[in-house]
Amino acid sequence: MKKTIEISVPDSWKDITLKKYLDLQADLENYKDDDEAQSAFMLYHLCGIDLSQIKGMKAKSYADILNTVGQFMAKTDLPLQRFVMINGIEYGFEPNLGAMSYGAYADITKYDTITIDKNWAKIMSILYRPIEKRKGDTYSIKSYEGIVDDTKWLEVSMDIHFGCLFFFVLILTDLANSTLNSLIATGDIPANYKPILERSGKVMQQLLNLREEMSER
């Protein structure tokens, strides 16, 4: 007698938590030279389908699920969401990056890379803090006290995380383009302008590289 199983297939990053994403990325890296294993891990982490179930699936069903998953995974340039509700508490994105405290800035930039990895939840904990006052789109958040509570961000969906990441990617890309355009306008472009732009900020270059990597997926 054949056993029927019910499979929940996500169709957007809203269905995937940061914890699931990080677990998936770890297995994809460990099996980066094995396409079949990577596909199996995608279904395991994102759909809860284990290896024994995968082996019993029809080829068409397997391919259809992979196609559905692959379509939303390719879209990571999502909009910034300034307000996030976690466990009944509303958190707001840093409303004035230019006036961000030195402590918050120092704690964010101490990481070697700014990308969605094991440190990303800590960065989110610094950028998003509980809202103290809000009137429409105007709000203030709790002052940064050097306390990082990253565990709650592991259960937040990836649309929130990608939205925050690409907010910075776009800002820094625009900054790099504006710098180059300014040099062109004044005719002061040095022969080695690319290395100069790269050295202008380690974080900028990391994020520019990250966007290129994501666009190739």
Image: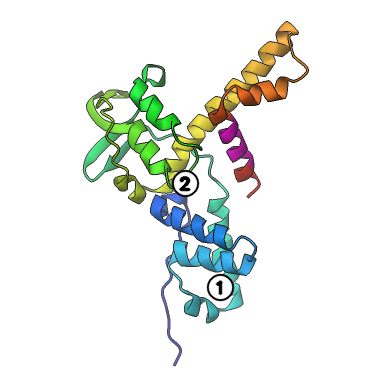
Secondary structure at numbered mark 2: loop
Question: Dot 1 corresponds to which residue?
Answer: 61
- Residue 67: image quadrant is bottom right
Distance from the alpha carbon under mark 1 to that under mark 2: 31 Å
Which disc is residue 137 wearing? none
Residue 155 appears left or right of 171: left
| x, y percent for residue 122 | 36, 40
Q: Mostly what secondary structure, the magenta segment?
A: helix
Residue at which label 2 appears: 117
Mark 1 element type: helix
Query: Among all residues in the image, which is located at the extreme bottom?
Result: 1
The amino acid on which the numbered mark 2 sits, given as a three-letter code, is Asp
> Which one is earlier in the sequence, the residue at label 1 or at label 2?
1
Confirm whether residue 100 shows in the render. yes
**Residue 125 horizontal/vertical position (percent):** 33, 37
| Quadrant housing the N terminus | bottom left
